[in-house]
Image: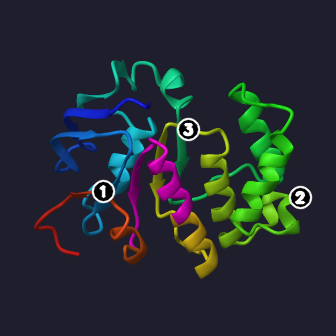
Amino acid sequence: MPASLRLDHVTKQYADGAPVLDGLTRTFDAGRMTMLVGPNGSGKTTLLRLLSVLAYPTAGTVRYGDLDIHAHPYRYLQHVGIVHAEAGLPEHLTAVELLEWILRSRGKWTGRATERIGALLDDLSLDERRTNLLGTYSSGMLKKTQIAAALIADPEVLLMDEPLRSLDRATTEATLDKIEGFVAGGGLAVVASHLTSGLSGRADDVLRLGEGKPV
């Protein structure tokens, strides 16, 4: 069973501006999906960047079980699948090559890896262009690739910022089913999305950020 993610009095402040997050204490538990909600600028992406170790807290700590994730980022990230709001994928690889690299880099390459990659891309409706370079992909194809990359190595933690953006209806439903199945299997998911209609009925918890800020 995955561990919990715990934020202890976490503050994030940029330069001399007001804190985006101010003394946040929160526990995200395994087997649950938490939906982040709040107006633009409320700190949803900032929180996900902290949990992804793309940003460091100004004060406070984030722990995965007993592990300080910012002190030991490599050990922590071996357990994590991430979908960022922007793709940022290597344009010189294909979707298949990217997933192969993830499995090999995490020591999870097996004799059935190629079959697993194909099945996951089929589920997300990434068609025959999966063998084309990522630099030629549409925004929807890039998002499908991001989701597949986040899931392929069987992570324990799933962090997703706008995972439904640019997806067609069928792939949106497939993605929601994937998240739901991941959580049902004991995974820990934290998701932020402006497209909340599909997520709200499936989320176990809601964390509201930036109460009182204008939308």
- Seen from the viewer's position, the closer of residues 16 and 204 is 204
Residue 29 in the figure: left or right of residue 115: left
Residue 21 in the figure: left or right of residue 68: left
Q: Quadrant of residue 124?
A: bottom right
Specify few, some or many for label 3: CA neighbours under 10 Å numbering under 14, 14-19, or 20 or more: some
Specify few, some or many for label 2: CA neighbours under 10 Å numbering under 14, 14-19, or 20 or more: few
**Which mark's residue is nearer the viewer, 1 or 3?**
1
Instruction: Tell me the amino acid under the disc marked 1.
Output: Asp
Q: Quadrant of residue 59?
A: top left
Provide residue 215's location: percent of width, then percent of height: 23, 75
Q: Is residue 192 magenta?
A: yes
Instruction: Tell me the amino acid under the disc marked 2.
Output: Thr
Q: Is residue 154 magenta?
A: no
85 relative to 82, above or below: below
Residue at numbered disc 1? 204
Residue at x 41%, y 45% (from the top left corner)? 49
Instruction: Tell me the amino acid under the disc marked 3.
Output: Pro
Provide residue 182's location: percent of width, then percent of height: 51, 49
Residues drawn in magenta: 177-194
Q: Which of the two labelled residues, at mark 1 and mark 2, occupies the earlier sequence position?
A: 2
Alpha carbon distance from label 1 to label 3: 19 Å
Alpha carbon distance from label 2 to label 3: 24 Å
Alpha carbon distance from label 1 to label 2: 37 Å
Residue at numbered disc 3? 155
| Residue 131 image label | 2
